[in-house]
Amino acid sequence: MSAASWNAAPGAPLRGEVRVPGDKSVSHRAIMLAALADGTSRIDGFLEGEDARATEAIFRRLGVLIETPGAGSRIVHGVGIDGLRASDAPLDCGNAGTGMRLIAGLLAGQAFDSTLVGDPSLSKRPMRRVTEPLARMGARIDTGEGGVPPLHVHGGTPLRGIEFDNVLASAQVKSCLLLAGLYADGETVVHEPRPTRDYTERMLAAFGWPIEFAPGIARLTGGHRLRATDVRVPADFSSAAFFLVAASIVPGSDLLLRRVGMNPRRTGLLHVLRLMGADIVESDAGEEGGEPVADLRVRHAPLHGIDVPEQHVPDMIDEFPVLFIAAACAHGATRVTGAHELRVKESDRIATMAAGLRALGVDLDEAEDGATIRGRAGGALGGNARIDSHGDHRIAMAFAVAAQRSGSPVTVDDVANVATSFPGFESLARDVGFGLTTA
């Protein structure tokens, strides 16, 4: 997407059927494991976003043949667990923090050196959370000053399995260590303070690697092989979230979201919206690519403020920007605590959301680990505002949702990075009733 800004304003009630793009987390992992498998895998529903394509491009540079028979489809000719070869240039992760942290784990076990780089946003994000436990496994990784990218991963260093108590409830840290554990001598065990997304564990099992996992713990041993398998990527819950909230807050709305990924470690927002009074009904449950899926029908309903239960926080960390919008349109106060991770995402999401909501006339108190948002139920949000998304794709889409309840137009700046996770958001949103145009 090339637009630098959006003009957003109330449109029509949101109606129709929506199939959002494929899950970004599953797309990343499908490429990685298919590349390391013995044999040829087909991936359908692959997210044609810049983050997932950056991961795909990295594995091409590492010697993996990947064909594109059509949009959303990839055929990956795996090179085996020990078949990657050195790149003659740095490996560019773009904006993908997931890609960089997981690939760092895989590269720690290779025989060759590699350098991982990213865009200006990714180049500010913390990497010690993965480089320090990887060092305990025997890896040697140099970082930029302050523990940020670029990462220079030294090859030829034997890895050993460790038992790691992860103080962060982070699926990226867990996944990084499990992927390094594929190359380690002995057992790698990761304990978590709260359960996080188990995409990596499910997909390793689907590709035939022996792994044991339950909420809060995962363990595997090195020395096995991955076998090729076909993967159907479900629709991304984080992308569906913008439509779930928009239809909840825009009167007269009735939307059907098709085949949405319903991994229980991903759907915290669904539980929280229901606690707030949202009308969201699941149907036609099934499974795609080892992941649970369902259709979601959402209709407008009056929302009320709540204290967001902290046990849901790890399962909705990417959905907090749009939850803040729901809270702004609810009756009463919504309190978010335990969300420190929002400070180190693509932007400081607490500060950026707070600034944008204040520009729309919303009263809130910002905290180090969250915020208290006093909703404006029954009244429109302010308009004639200019919102700086700071290049954060989820902030940009969240304020496109907010503008559907504004009293006058809102300009959302710096929206090009929406293409990292949701190519086509603008046109799909307009199709179901959003007032949204390129500035």
Image (cartoon, grey):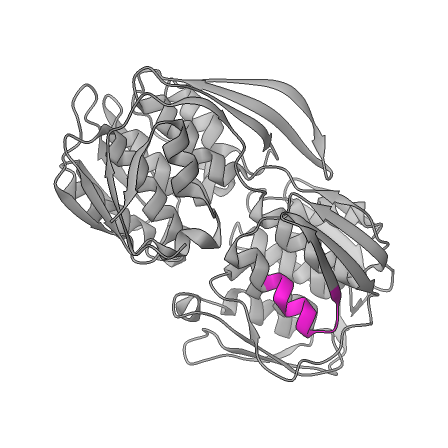
The furthest residue to the front: 70
Q: Nearer the viewer, residue 249 or 175?
A: 249
**On screen, residue 133 above or below 334:** below
Question: Is residue 62 within the magenta segment?
Answer: yes
Question: Is residue 240 within the magenta segment?
Answer: no
Q: Residue 381: give x, y in percent of width and height.
A: 17, 31
On-image quarter of the N terminus: bottom left
**On screen, residue 432 above or below 235:** above
Q: Which residues are magenta?
A: 55-65
**On screen, residue 316 above or below 94:** above
- Whether residue 49 is visible here, answered yes or no, is yes
Q: Residue 147: give x, y in percent of width and height.
A: 46, 74
317 relative position to 142: left or right: left
74 relative position to 277: left or right: right
437 relative position to 25: left or right: left
- Whether residue 311 is visible here, answered yes or no, is no
Q: Residue 153 falls in which quadrant of the image?
A: bottom right
**On screen, residue 178 above or below 255:** below
Which secondary structure dominates the residues rendered in magenta?
Answer: helix
- Residue appearing at x 41%, y 31% in the figure: 431
Q: Residue 363 falls in which quadrant of the image?
A: top left
- Residue appearing at x 81%, y 50% in the figure: 207
Q: Residue 244: give x, y in percent of width and height.
A: 43, 28
Q: Residue 429 falls in which quadrant of the image?
A: top left
Q: Nearer the viewer, residue 194 or 390?
A: 390
Q: Residue 58: give x, y in percent of width and height.
A: 63, 69
